[in-house]
Image: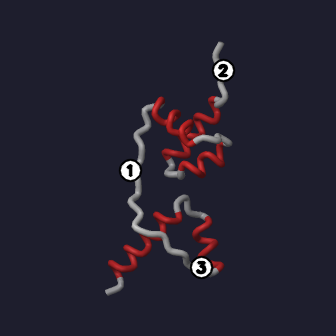
Amino acid sequence: MGRGRSITLDQESRVLSLYKDGIAIKEIMKETDIKSEQTIYRILDSNGVPRRPKVRGVRKIFVTIEEDVATILDKEQSVSLYVNEAIRHYHDNRR
């Protein structure tokens, strides 16, 4: 006798939608109340969704941000991606 389905079709659909929108796996877990990264990846694989490339982070830094910047970053799906892109843009256009 097998286990009953523990993930609903609504959860599965939400996982696929969030992942395709670029949401991080940990955030998808929070949004869908799925407790396992492995379950998220199983859903993606069983639906033929290609995995995003892993980001090769060089190091982590900690910074203090001002309130207005915090408000901007709160609206971003990936703060790391946003900050990296903003720094590249600023660097390329400061001349």
Residue in the foreground of this view, choosing between 43 and 73: 43
**What amino acid type should be assigned to the residue bearing mark 1?**
Pro
**What amino acid type should be assigned to the residue bearing mark 3?**
Ile
Label 3 element class: loop
Residue that protrudes farthest toward the bottom in the picture: 95
For residue 3, the mark is 2
Q: Residue at x 65, y 47 (%)?
A: 31
Quarter of the image with the C terminus is bottom left
Question: Separation of disc 2 and disc 3 at Cα?
Answer: 48 Å
Q: Is residue 8 left or right of residue 51?
A: right
For residue 65, the mark is 3
Q: Is residue 95 left or right of residue 6?
A: left
Local packing at callout 3 (Cα closer than 10 Å; few below 14, some 14-19, many 20+) is few
Local packing at callout 2 (Cα closer than 10 Å; few below 14, some 14-19, many 20+) is few
Local packing at callout 1 (Cα closer than 10 Å; few below 14, some 14-19, many 20+) is few
**What amino acid type should be assigned to the residue bearing mark 2?**
Arg
Label 2 element class: loop
For residue 53, the mark is 1
Q: Residue at x 51, y 49 (%)?
A: 21
Quick check: 6 above or below 19?
A: above
Q: Looking at the image, is mark 2 or mark 3 nearer the viewer?
A: 2
* Tag 2–tag 1 contact (CB < 8 Å): no
Quarter where residue 75 is shown: bottom right
Q: Position of residue 72 (x, y in %)?
A: 59, 71
Quick check: 13 above or below 86?
A: above
Q: Residue at x 41, y 63 (%)?
A: 57
